[in-house]
Image: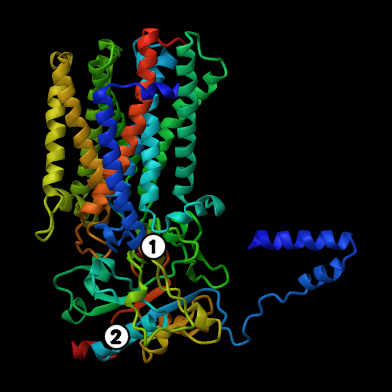
Amino acid sequence: MKIERREFLKLAGLSAIFGLGGTAIAASVQQTPSYIPDPKELTGKRWALVINMDKFKTDADVKRVIEVCHTKHNVPNIPNPKQEVKWIFTEMMENVFPEQQDKYLTEHYKHMPFLTLCNHCANPPCVRVCPTQATFKRKSDGIVMMDMHRCIGCRFCMAGCPYGARSLNWIDPRPYLDPKKINPEFPTRMKGVVEKCTLCYELIAVGKIPACAEASNGAIVFGDLEDPKSEVRKVLAETYTIRRKPELGTRPSVYYVIGGMKDAGKGA
Amino acid sequence: MLERALNGGKLYWTWIGFLLAVFGVGFLFYLQQWNVGLGITGMSRDVSWGFYISQFTFLVGIAASGVMVVLPFYLHDYKAFGRITILGEFLAIPAVIMCVTFIVVDLGQPYRAMNVIFHPSPSSILFYDTIVLNGYLLLNLLVGWTCLHAEKKSIAPPKWVKPFIILSIIWAPSIHTVTAFIYAGIPGKHFWLTAVMAARFLASAFASGPALLLILALIVRKFSKFDPGSEAIQTLGKIVTYCMILNVFLLGLELFTAFYSGIPGHMHAWEYLYAGIDGKGVLVPLMWLSAILAAVSISMLVFPQVRKNETLLAIACVCVFFSLWIDKGFGLVVGGFVPNSFEQVTEYWPTLAEFSIAMGVWALGFLILTVLYKVAVSIKEESGGEAIH
């Protein structure tokens, strides 16, 4: 694209020299409007999520969150678990936090399914290892993005991610989309590229919060980690939270509330 | 000089035909992979690198090991290696070509491979790997071809080639160090996150590469009038012995750190590879075969009397080669992914298609090797085999 534009400018320059009205063309090129963000766009320096699994009343509530995300982003439903593509999914607490494994851990948490997704790390190893910058951290708000048109499918990022958050399209994903539910607003993918949660950047751009937080009835809180007045900071100040594998220095932006249920002691 | 590869007997052409057939089968399966995607392999969301990347890793070592004959000859004027330096250089060329081919067949979007050049990313180890591998290929082509051309004319190689030879000597360890860094710099993969990874890579490379070279030298002697010389073969045998012992020593260091510290994450991959976890252990027999082959080879190689018997030496070298091929060309990569980041075990085994594609790449490599060796050996047969420098 860049080359084409450069060629065009060269042509415009040449025609200007020959007095063929090139100046007018060049002027119109300069006037090409640049991207104007939606005035409703949410702005933050480092977006984060705080997940409180205790606030999910039933398994159906958890499933709904996954369903909403996967439908909105045209994530295929591939039955073979080895070739699954998933952006947000559940694993037992002892698998999400393997270093916390303890046979005496309260049953309430031990086998509780925990939602897990891309942690949008402040120091993301996937970005570091990517040989084409197809995955990159957005400077403005810290979202770890995916350019699926640039990805060569080398899967270095999948090896690099310590959270199992990334999926390769081992096969063409399109036959595994429900034709009735395809979201025309979001691109579908082709085989051979890696994908993952991109924190609903497309919703943030029009002033909406990520779909999982929206569908969670308050169990997932979204906000700017660097804004002391944000809702996530309020939760972090008031409750005990943990992050996945913080010892690796990745600085995840997804927090989990532990013991957040006011009457957890009585209930469990 | 290449036309010399067209002069061969029935056995030569049968071998070429065989390699072409294996390559053809691999190519057909690759067309299937091109159409369907990497889904035709045994790889998965959890074990996202498999046989292709393991072969790549192993072959970088083979490529780097050429330095083990080039260095003594050029830096220490060790004349016995003068007869086989070209065999070392001409082994490195197909090895690097196989490496690059394995990377390409492993890509989900192979026709976007040039994105690595268009969007260079100096933070990625693959960026450096691209540079060092291609650089090493060019260096070996340049040096090998120029020196052989000089030998054909019975003159000393031109002076300008010497700096390139020195550069290739420094360059060789770098290709395997960078390849080790692909693994050793990843947080959260305890099996790979080890400072001795590059050292282990080099030790195993300098055992498996010379072992293969020694076998190739014996084959050359059997099928041509060119004799690589028994002194060169004996010295290669010593190199294999020391490097294999060093490799097993480094492996022992890994085991000590993992099991004496008792840190679960550090032990899990070893437990999976050598014992299996939760009844899952498809690699266990293979890993033990590797361990047994290593033990057998070392217990043969340490005795000079055994090494002096070229048949026994060849058998020991075959053991070394396959032991390390299993260890590095299979276990090392898969072990890093098992258990996965959720401490669950997803097993990996290559599919027929995947295996055939890999064998196709090997056949391509051996085809190039055969042609290069044929050219080199036919010139050696005329010149008497002594390289001048």
Residue furthest left in the image: B279
Decide which of tag 1 and tag 2 comes sooner along the chain: 2
Q: For mark 1, what is the residue?
A: A192
Residue A36 in sight from this viewpoint: yes
Q: The disc labelled 2 sits on which kind of residue? A: Val
Host chain of mark 1 = A
Q: Say above or below: B175 vs B310.
A: below
Q: Which mark is residue A62?
A: 2
Q: Is residue A25 left or right of residue A102?
A: right
Q: Is residue B389 left or right of residue A79?
A: right
Figure check: A109 above or below B271: below
The residue at 78%/60% (across/down) is A11
The residue type indicated by label 1 comes to Gly
Residue B65 in view in this figure: no
B373 and A222: which is toward the camera: B373
Q: Residue at x 35, y 72 (%)?
A: A173
